[in-house]
Image: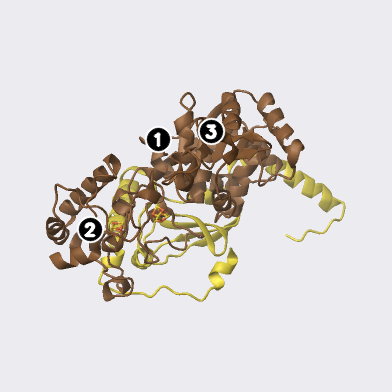
Chain colours: A brown, B yellow
Amino acid sequence: MTTTKHRVGEHLRDQGVSRRAFLKFCTASASLMALPPGLIPAMAAALEQARRPSVIWLSFQECTGCTESLTRSHAPTVEDLILEMISLDYHHTLQAAAGEAAEAAREQAMKDNFGKYLLIVDGSLPGPDANPGYSTIAGVSNYAMLMEAVEGAAAVIAVGTCAAFGGLPEAAPNPTGAVAVMDLIKNKPLVNVSGCPPVPMVITGVLAHYLAFGRLPERDAYHRPLAFFGQSIHDRCYRRPFYDKGLFAETFDDEGARAGWCLYRLGCKGPSTYNACATMRWNAGTSWPIEAGHPCLGCSEPRFWDAGSFYAPLSVPTDLSSSRILTAGAAGALVGGTVATLARRTVATAATSRQPVTADELEQTL
Amino acid sequence: MSALSSIPVRVQSVSHGTANCGNAVPILHEVRHALERLIATGEGTQIDLNAIPFGPEDEAHLLAVLGVGEVRATIDALGPTHVQETAIPGVWLIDYRITEDQRLALHLDIGDIPEILRTQRQDLDTALTTLDARLTRAQGGAQFES
Ligand code: SF4
Ligand code: SF4
């Protein structure tokens, strides 16, 4: 099972993949990683020579939505190719082996590839001070299993908001004492692919980057890959011209909603949310929540479950009154950007100092 | 996944001038710069349209402005890839697909001919061997479908 001798290029040629097909794969991967198309030849050369890494995938307190997101990825052939390029040695939902045989496979892969394997984690886990009984696999606490597996890992990918930031299990009152993977792992390269669930192409994009360049992609302050999380939903939102003109939908079925106006006043968290939905979209690239008429929930941000109602407009920074925001919205892009920056800063610094504004209150100020 | 396309839901098109295709125009200007560069230096450019935050009407607007040219080709490798020269010579549209209705990437290629249309050096390595094998089989009286 632990085939790490083959180089990716050889492996693909063995599978009868033509050079044009390989170039197409590289084009799709570069597009996923938001790399400029001019880099495709260099990426093809690097991928050709890459070795197939062993991957151990641990699932803790999670709903399997993240694995579902990956395995229902819109591009099965490309995704299959990426999965071909790794050696998935342990994933207790996907693997055929069960019970002791599965655990033995994990231990063997960890021993054979010590220092070289990629560790993927989905789900948060009860921290070292919590009752370990809240989540165990084969009688081993999540905490013990993670700490053992991380020792020989070359890098760690936390997939989904639960693994990245604690997610739903960690939401108040956090009965299981759940913590994020990055709270426990400080001495290994780590990337957080947040989202509830994460955009599937972002998961495959990070894997393709690791394969092509032998290291994790560049990351932001929350360890998220910048290629996908470098810009806010608001910065990439096609409804932004309406925000800048101060044209907001007030309800889900008013004229503004039908005309595709900005969803800010219906609770859109786009200004403080960093994710790739606005360009990558969901379901075979069909659409994405805002295009479907629903405000962004902010699912790729820390503590999004505890950040108030999904339908309450974003907190207004205390140093900016709501009437100023509305004037600003009408005044144009420049001030719109300022509001977004302030909103981001407010959310990032203190959820507790929020001054929630309801749609009714905003209406009164109009 | 193919079942998605069978769900009879259609996005209602709402026209507000160019408000829903505000991102197509800057791309068209980028294409213009790339064409100038191609003419002056011979250097080609690829633009990844997936990386652009297009609204529902942007793509249609962009493609309508570029129009349809003389050359059209389909490559059958890892699903179909449709290559189409636009009405602007030197501006190619490349639609990388997994199946007919699932897109992987959409590129504009500003150049003489897109790389993916050329015969690839690595595939040439096996060209003689393949032809020799076919010659041997032909001499043995074998029939070929294509
Ligand atoms: S507030 Fe939401 S809907 Fe409005 S422009 Fe920003 S991201 Fe788009
Ligand atoms: S639009 Fe917002 S809430 Fe919805 S998936 Fe994207 S980041 Fe998450």
Kind of residue indicated by mark 3: Ala
Callout 3 crowding tier (Cα within 10 Å): few <14, some 14–19, many ≥20: some
- The outermost residue toward the right is B140
List the residue tagged with mark 1: A219
Ligand 2, by image quadrant, is: bottom left
Residue A46 is labelled as 3
> Does residue A130 appear to the left or right of B65 in the view shown?
right
Label 3 to label 1: alpha-carbon separation? 21 Å
B12 or A188, which lies in front?
A188
Label 1 to label 2: alpha-carbon separation? 33 Å
Q: Are marks 3 and 2 on the same chain?
A: yes
> Does residue B127 appear to the left or right of A168 in the view shown?
right
List the residue tagged with mark 2: A357
Callout 2 crowding tier (Cα within 10 Å): few <14, some 14–19, many ≥20: some
Q: Position of residue B29 (x, y in %)?
A: 27, 55
Q: Residue at x 48, y 49 (%)?
A: A198
Q: Position of residue B102 (x, y in %)?
A: 54, 61
B41 or B73, which lies in front?
B73
Label 3 to label 2: alpha-carbon separation? 51 Å
Discs 3/1, front: 1
> Numbered disc 3: what chain?
A
Quadrant for the N terminus of chain A, please. Answer: top right
SS type, badge 3: helix
Q: Earlier in the sequence, mark 3 or mark 2?
A: 3
Q: Quadrant of residue A58?
A: top right
